[in-house]
Structures are given as structure tokens and as C-alpha cells.
Image (cartoon, helix red, strand yellow):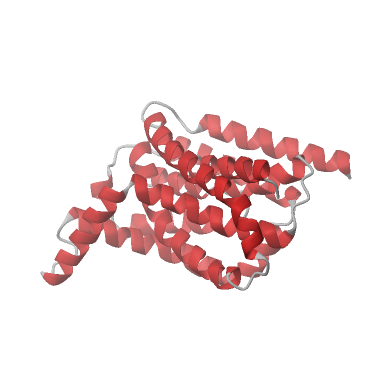
């Protein structure tokens, strides 16, 4: 991997992790379409670190929310009224919504890892992302705010997040869609989607780190990775801010069209290349 490749992949990761167009798909498609031959071991290290970079972005953006949620949860436990405060209740709903994806990741780990090696399979899953976005716009009434969220909503949205363990299914897209099908407003659904991504991204990063620390020749690649990680963190932060504003006035249809177009293009390229 070169520094230019590192920066480009970092920008791609930062943008597509939070926009509803699938970061996993783009990290498969970009090297495939550009004929980059990145050693698997080096690609693995970069994928682990770039996920941490985007995790930093979402934590930095929502740090005030996170501090308020943690304080409210602790206060509720001390007072033995864990669900009385709406902010504390939001914290518990985030944890509830994390469970389905965690279970899916443990049970389907091997199947998911094999799918990551196939641009064609990833392209097909892009159509699923598009379908979820269209479903959200067609079904959602967009009348509810985050303070009305209950445990049934959290479990439902959690199952939508579980679908996103497959490459090509956008985590933000599926969870935003899940919230909107429970009639949450678009910005509220997006905010909850970003907040609930933190525990699962943190857990995934910790698990991957167990393999990461055993990877040989780590030191020789770090200097190449650093610019890409900075690019991922900065663009991730900007993508969050932009999307939350965008969804105040716009629908998800544009993202659905993009997913279909990109999926068709990758499938066409794969047929041409044989």
C-alpha cells in the first residue's frame, strides 16, 4: 500500500461509514476497480485501524451526548430509577439495540468473512441497502422524536443493524431505515443510528485487535497508514455533520439510486473482466 492509496481509502472509509452507502462495499470496490494489489495482511491491518479512526470521529462529534448519557445512566442506577430520566433511557436503548448485531457477528462470522472477498456478492448486497432506504421512505411516517423511543423500537432497529454485518449493507443506512420504519423523524433516526454504532464498532475493534497485535511487520506499515487514518477521522466527522443537516430537508432516495447504480456498475465490470 502506498501513502496515496492509504489517504484515498481513508477518505472513502470516513465518508461511506456514515453516509448510507456502505463503507464495507467501497473498501472492496475501490481496490477492485483500480486494480490495486494490496497484500492481504496489510489490508487487514489498515481495515482494523481505519475502523478505529471513524470510531474516534463519531465519539468526538457526539461527546457531549455521550457524557450526558453516561452521567444519566450512573445517576439512575444510584437512585435505583434507571429509566426515569429520558437521557438515561436513551443510553439503555442504545445497549439493547446493540445486542442483535453482536449476536449476528458471533454466529455468522465465517460466512461474512467469505463474502468480503467477492465484489459480485458485495454488489448484490448494495441492492438490499437501496431497498431498505426506499422502504424507510415509503413506510415511515416521520412523526416521532428520540424521547419516545422504547425497547421494542430498540430491538427492531438492532435487527436492522444486524443485517449490516454483510458487505454492501450500509450500517448507517440499515439502522436509519429501521428507525424510520418505527416512524422516527429522519434526523432523530440518524442520530440514534450513529450513537448505537459506537458500542458495536468498539467491540468489533477490540476483537479485531486480538488478531491485529499478532500481525507481523506491523511497524513497517504504520507510517503509511497514519495519513489515511487522519483522513478517515476528519472526513467521518464532516460526513456526520453534513448528513444530519441534509436529512432535515431531503429524503433517502438519492442514496438508494447511488447504491443501485454502483452495484450495477461493479457487476458489469466483473462480467467484462470475467
In this view, 222 is above or below 210: above
Residue at image coords 46%, 64%? 100
Is 234 left, or right, of 213 in this rendering? left
Quarter containing the C terminus: top right
In this view, 209 is above or below 37: below
Is 70 left, or right, of 234 in this rendering? left
Q: Is residue 185 visible?
A: no
Residue at image coords 28%, 46%? 146
> Closest to the observer: 83 or 13?
13
Residue 67 % position (x, y): 24, 55
Residue 52 % position (x, y): 49, 56
Residue at image coords 57%, 59%? 48
Residue at image coords 57%, 46%? 228
Q: Is residue 261 visible?
A: yes
> Closest to the observer: 33 or 167?
33
Residue 260 % position (x, y): 65, 36
Amino acid at each position: 500500500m502506498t501513502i496515496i492509496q492509504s489517504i484515498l481509502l481513508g477518505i472513502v472509509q470516513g465518508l461511506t461509514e456514515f453516509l448510507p452507502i456502505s463503507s464495507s462495499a467501497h473498501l472492496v470496490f475501490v481496490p477492485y476497480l483500480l486494480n490495486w494489489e494490496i497484500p492481504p495482511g496489510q489490508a487487514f491491518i489498515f481495515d482494523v485501524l481505519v475502523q478505529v479512526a471513524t470510531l474516534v470521529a463519531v465519539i468526538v462529534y457526539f461527546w457531549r451526548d455521550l457524557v450526558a448519557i453516561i452521567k444519566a445512566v450512573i445517576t439512575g442506577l444510584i437512585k435505583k430509577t434507571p429509566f426515569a430520566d429520558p437521557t438515561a433511557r436513551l443510553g439503555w436503548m442504545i445497549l439493547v439495540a446493540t445486542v442483535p448485531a453482536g449476536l449476528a457477528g458471533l454466529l455468522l462470522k465465517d460466512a461474512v468473512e467469505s463474502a468480503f472477498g467477492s465484489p459480485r456478492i458485495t454488489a448484490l448486497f448494495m441492492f438490499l441497502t437501496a431497498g431498505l432506504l426506499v422502504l424507510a421512505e415509503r413506510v415511515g411516517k416521520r412523526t416521532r422524536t428520540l424521547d419516545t423511543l422504547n425497547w421494542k423500537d430498540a430491538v427492531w432497529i438492532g435487527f436492522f443493524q444486524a443485517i449490516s454485518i454483510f458487505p454492501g449493507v450500509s450500517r448507517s443506512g440499515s439502522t436509519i431505515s429501521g428507525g424510520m420504519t418505527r416512524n422516527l423523524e429522519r434526523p432523530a433516526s440518524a442520530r440514534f443510528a450513529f450513537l448505537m454504532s459506537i458500542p458495536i464498532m468498539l467491540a468489533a475493534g477490540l476483537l479485531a485487535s486480538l488478531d491485529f497485535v499478532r500481525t507481523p511487520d506491523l511497524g513497517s506499515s504504520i507510517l503509511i497508514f497514519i495519513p489515511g487514518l487522519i483522513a478517515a477521522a476528519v472526513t467521518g466527522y464532516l460526513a456526520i455533520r453534513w448528513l444530519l443537516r441534509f436529512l432535515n430537508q431531503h429524503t433517502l432516495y438519492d442514496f438508494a439510486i447511488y447504491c443501485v447504480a454502483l452495484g450495477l456498475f461493479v457487476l458489469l465490470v466483473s462480467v467484462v473482466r470475467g
